[in-house]
Image (cartoon, coloured by chain):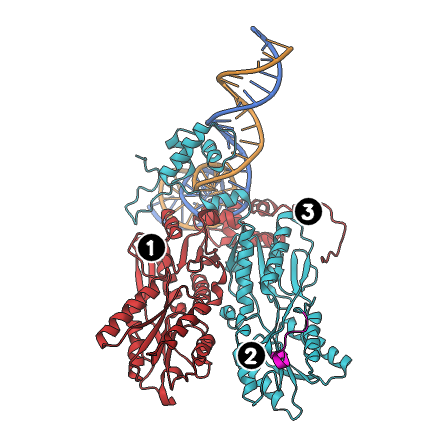
Chain colours: A red, B cyan, C blue, D orange
Amino acid sequence: MTTSPRGGGKRPAPVPRVRLVDVAREAGLSKTTVSAALNGTGRLSDAVRLHARETARRLGYRPNASARLLRAGHARLIGYAVREYVDTPWSYMESPYFAQLTSASAQAALAHGYALVLLPTHSARDEWADLPLDAAVMADPLVGDPLVEDFLAARIPVVSDRRVEGRPGAHWVDVDHETAIRGVLDHLEAGGARRIGLVGAHSTSLFYEAGLTAYQAWCRERGFPPLVGLAPHPSTQATRAAIDLLLASPDRPDALFILIEDSPLSILDAIRAHGLRVPEDLLLACVSDDPMAGRTDPPITTLSLRPSEIATVGMELLINALESGDRTPTGRLVETRLEVRGTSRRGGGAEASGPPRTG
Amino acid sequence: MTTSPRGGGKRPAPVPRVRLVDVAREAGLSKTTVSAALNGTGRLSDAVRLHARETARRLGYRPNASARLLRAGHARLIGYAVREYVDTPWSYMESPYFAQLTSASAQAALAHGYALVLLPTHSARDEWADLPLDAAVMADPLVGDPLVEDFLAARIPVVSDRRVEGRPGAHWVDVDHETAIRGVLDHLEAGGARRIGLVGAHSTSLFYEAGLTAYQAWCRERGFPPLVGLAPHPSTQATRAAIDLLLASPDRPDALFILIEDSPLSILDAIRAHGLRVPEDLLLACVSDDPMAGRTDPPITTLSLRPSEIATVGMELLINALESGDRTPTGRLVETRLEVRGTSRRGGGAEASGPPRTG
DNA sequence: TATTGATGCGGGAACGTTCCCGCACAAGGG
DNA sequence: CCCTTGTGCGGGAACGTTCCCGCATCAATA
């Protein structure tokens, strides 16, 4: 249904936009003078400046953004794409990590006077070639990501939230996976766990690989058995299946560390379906940035990857590189944060010391 | 070997971009010809077209987006701002409704060849005046929203997800609140409820007002007592307090309809804290687009506002208006969807008929 | 041979802005 | 009275692209 207050429409009437030169003519000035008056530049008498501004206001003049851009040589526009969910292009907003990364990126960009453009996951060159992008944020890039290659080839600086080799124009921010993982494992061990199961996923993402490697090294050092459940992909169903597999095993873990950022509720459900109590029968820690994790019963101990922090730092790096014109790659590590909550504390006592930090 | 035309600087090496004219010179052609060759336009021999393309490829030519925009007169860029959360500028991604609205908007825009630019909630004119925006999406605009006014004044068409009066360039998509609310209430009544409590919020959003009005009218018709719990603002804490108030009352409701999109888990918790079983002691229906609602125990009956649908239809309206140049306001209603699940079905029987639709 | 039409390519204006200049004029010092 | 310096404003080129033309050339037809 369409509300159309006036049925009989004439031509679309392509109202010509009022340009700088229109204002100039109306004011009896040159466009140079009007431009200077509006921008607060140049040497002008107050009378002329005021007159120009008043005329512009009266005519409803709006400068043409495209023309400014062409002159300025940059658009103050930053592309943003999440590369992980290539199959399900737009579902990443459902992930708290990416939701926070996205909004924090937009916020950080705007704080520097840039705006963020949302690109689709599967973005091909022709999707953004027409966009005057100055830089790009690539969340969870693939290895040898073609999209990243495209940007670099176009000499558009890129920042990603995964460590990459130093190539000109390719910047990165990441967390110290090894330290973070070990921090969680140490914490679970301190809570009495001796058989810590790890739930990871097959993925293009480096995160799971790094996590698995660190886990195995840690187990070897401690002489603990490595108990790994691997989901074919990081989904709720697959995660649950992996958990089931671990918990159904004859030598069941006494603690679980979920590397996959999944719904906190679903994870608790999966465990309870095996008749296990948390934390009495099983300690639990999850990688998650879902605020919900703090509101479950019991609240879940989480390792936060700190997407907001990553976004802020990454944008800093990116804009630094952009405005200095320096293409030498830069990178920074940000600290993860271990939020110790009920699922990893037996007896519900106060936590040992302040929230341990890793990194 | 190219003769470096501009910038004989020893500074950070501002590598001169290769322009169309550079390709033309290298290929021994005119820029007109090269342009036509690359764009697949004009009348050119295959030999020349190939040669031009090859030369462009060899030199790594990338067309300047800003220049194209200036020529084309439009940027194919659409602004996007969520106006509801003015106080907490970027937190809207945590709401499934807005998360879905955002990603669906970006997706729909791209399907039409447009890209979405994320604007901050509190966006002032100077934040986007430099952006070559062709149109804008305003999610949950305020009444007489100054940002909307700015856009309209700049002759930039706007679409919002709330019904607005017909002003030139202002388009809208909305759901039929009345029908939707009544649909839920009818459903709860059919499940045996006679004392249906409503939890709403004070807000700038029309949604709560419309909901409350429809509810009160419905109760009057049925002769049911209106039991309303109002949260001062739509937050988890305030919602819980409102629920508590209703459930602690001596004449407790036998069903609850939560108008506020809150965490499904938190709502179930709030009810259970009163020692009530769902759906045995209390039927429950919530306005929510959180996929989690389908995975709780029992799964929650929800009224979906269908943000993806709203975004898709809205983008259609917007781009239609944009490309036709027609500023006469248009609007469309989309159907809500009532997902009947466990919390509103006593005995866990199969549902009466297919998922009732409203609208 | 002259006329027409089609084909292949290039010249140059336009898009709307900013900014480097240059010019006119006034004031002040020698 | 001339020279210098400073002030106020405008002319016009650039930014890099697209696209409307016009000018050749050549084949086909009268």
Q: Are marks 2 and 3 in contact (CB under 8 Å)?
A: no
Number of residues whose C-alpha sits closer than 10 Å to that of mark 3, classed few (under 14), some (14–19) or many (20 or more): few
Q: In the picture shown, does residue B305 fall above or below A63?
A: below
Please tell me whether mark 2 or mark 3 is closer to you in this view: 2
In this rendering, would A204 be left or right of B267?
left
First of labels 3, 1 by sequence position: 3
For label 1, the residue is: A170
Tell me where residue B273 appears, x and y as whole percent: 54, 88
Task: Tell me, yes or no, whether dots 3 and 1 are on the same chain.
Answer: yes
Residue B199 in view: no
Check disc 3 and give the amino acid type.
Pro
**Residue A12 tag number:** 3
Q: Classify A192 as above or below A61.
A: below
Q: Which mark is residue B188?
A: none
Residue type highlighted by circle 2: Pro
Task: Look at the image and give the residue range highlighted in magenta.
Answer: B343-353
